[in-house]
Amino acid sequence: MSETVRATIDGKAIEVPKGTTVIQAAAQIGIDIPRFCYHEDLPIDGNCRMCLVEVEKMPKLQIACNTQVTEGMVVHTESDKAKQAHRTTLEFLLVNHPIDCPVCDQAGECYLQDQYMDVGLHDSKVEPEEKVHKRKVVDLGPIMLDAERCVLCSRCLRFEEHVTGTNSFEFRNRGDHTQIATFEDRPITHNYAWNLADVCPVGALLSHDFRFKMRVWFLEPTDSVCPGCSTGCNIHVDHRDEEVHRLRPRRNVEVNKSWMCDIGRVEYKEIALDTRVTAARVRRGAGWEETTVATALDLVTEKILAAPRASAFLATPQATNEDVYMFRLLSERAGGMLDFRVGNPQERTQVREDNVLLRADRNPNTTGCVDQGIGRSGVDAILKACASEAVKVLVLQGAELLADPGVAAAAAKVPFVAVMASHEHPELAKAHCVLPAAVWAEVDGTFTNYQRRVQRIKRAVAPPGAAVPRWELAAGLVARLGEPIALSSARDVFALIARDVKVYSGLDHRLVGATGRALGGPAAAEARV
Amino acid sequence: MAAGVITVNRDTKPGLWPVMLGMGLVFSNMIKTMFGKELATIQFPEQKRPTSSRYRGIHVLTQREDGTPKCVACYMCATVCPAECIFIEAGERPEKDIEKYPTRFEIDLLRCVYCGFCVDACPEEAIVMSRENDLVGTTRAELIIDRDRLMDRGKLMEYGAGYRPSDHDVRRPVRIAALERLKREHGIVPGMPEPRSGGGRPAPR
């Protein structure tokens, strides 16, 4: 344990490691000091002067973000002097700020609005005609810039310098004509552009994708994990009336800090597509016949029982640990072959796509599949058995597996192919039974990321039509094959995983917690972002 | 005798007098309605009952000089609406000085409770109310009225303007009376809100 210092903030005693700043120490005891330029995951700049606090025996107010806590320090964040300083600083920041709140997408999550409600000088001394006007509605590709709303906190400059290393933004002009801009208004081209809209404390940088779509106060956030790659960035799923409107990074220092990539951020668009599979269907001659999930499961069971030890199962690393566990149980009950390494994602789990977050393996749960020992029979052996017509029943856990030409060719040779599909896929024409599956935002469960960190995903919206989580489909088949297991939720399935899989032993959904739980093993030693 | 039981004497006859009184009222009303000038009955729909200038009838979307809606699609009305009857879809205007406008603005008049909160919430005086109050339709869908019908002032303003924020003659006395009552009964003088104590703001992103 390193050296600690003791101090008092607003009458509360606190002991923190040496080097902790006042704003960090205050956050630990739930005191929120107003700020614009300070961001937990960016270097300290100290330019906005909003976080001024009164420190006893110091002649002047100090900025909380860049003042280290020292032994015996007594800090007042709510004193009249501090409040007056906040009010005066805010007055300066608002001198040239446009009265844009009705059309500004930041309204509702804007630091300026929040501070104004707390300490604002409610009668402005500035006439709207006197304000300095700057450039508005500047299209920077994924980002919209409104220089007039900017408070010049330089968070975006620091993000560009220290996180992406692209240095797109600069300050231009001087005095109250200072504004941020990119060189020659060039668009932001890197893969982390929408983080700029998140780091911007005001409405100067806004996401083009979310522009005018929804007012943020209507949205309800659900904590989840991005399914876009094996990094497993922690996210908020913002939804309203069973529709997901945006994904937003959730801070987790161990995984993604406060960032996520734009590729992950558009994952929500897949959820509400009209190509979703909403009902079970079985092949009748040349066409399809829509049926209930129960009837379809009866049919699959019948086919599995009719071909003892001649079935094969392909799992997908897109599925949650719970889905994968039930799928494995199903394959064991049916006595069939099982694997998941279609296209061999396992080898690429550790490969970085760039030097920030994105990884080459675009599956969120490859490590979870490995942990549960799904890679058993070998994909090549399964495909060969299919091609030689030794396999009579093939069950696929995802329609995307059919995108692999080898699987599609092998499936054509199998007399009965059942697919748990969330979206329509042209290759589904080769299937004989399609079971409607829910996607990640519609289920509870866990993903294990490349670091072997198990993280919770939570159900944000309801699945469309008759779609159910994949583990329920597998559990339905297991029950029909005899020996039903009493399961009512993904948490019950996770309890079975904790019982049967060694690295997960003793864990529970609740113990995994909001920011996940790192498990032992070789992957955990891998360097973190 | 048990409590709550009333004994009525049926032996006394009421006589003719109460009947005469009743009939007198009937005939006086009959003569008033036949020959009088101040009739309670009006010939609706040709004739309409006069309403006050604060009457909260069907909403009107006001326009700019070029005929585009004043509304900037800020969703304040939809947020405050207790009946959740306002549906807005925002779009981008080509003019950069306004940026945002409603591509769709619909009010479900069957859900609306005509409280006027939308008028109060609007920062642009874009939504006001008319005195139009006869609402007829053959289907429910017909009574979900869209942006163009809400902007059709000629039809909606036939009976004059209703509740609107710019009407100071109407609203000032009401507001002053409310402020006075607040001061008299609760000792509150509204001004700058009390600063909130720390921890009220959600965690920064």
Image: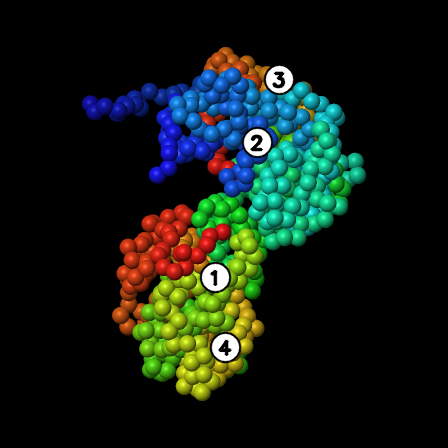
The residue mark sitting in front, 4 or 1, is: 1
Q: Please give the name of the residue rendered at 40% of the width and 25% of the height, measured from the top-left corner.
A: A71
The residue mark sitting in front, 3 or 4, is: 4
Query: Disc 4 versus disc 2: distance between alpha carbons?
Result: 57 Å
Q: Please give the name of the residue rendered at 30% of the width and 22% of the height, measured from the top-left corner.
A: B9
- Dot 4: element: helix
The residue mark sitting in front, 3 or 2, is: 2
- Dot 2: element: loop
Q: Please give the name of the residue rendered at 59% of the width and 30% of the height, measured from the top-left corner.
A: A48
The residue to which callout 3 is attached is B173
Q: Chain of mark 1?
A: A
The residue to which callout 1 is attached is A350
**Between residues A271 and A452, which one lies in front from this camera angle?**
A452
Query: Disc 4 versus disc 1: distance between alpha carbons?
Result: 25 Å
The residue to which callout 4 is attached is A407
- Dot 1: element: loop
Judged left or right of residue B48, residue A296 is left
Judge if badges 2 and 1 mark residues of a common chain: yes
- Dot 3: element: helix
The residue mark sitting in front, 4 or 2, is: 2
**What amino acid is found at the position of numbered circle 2 in the picture?**
Gly
Q: Chain of mark 2?
A: A
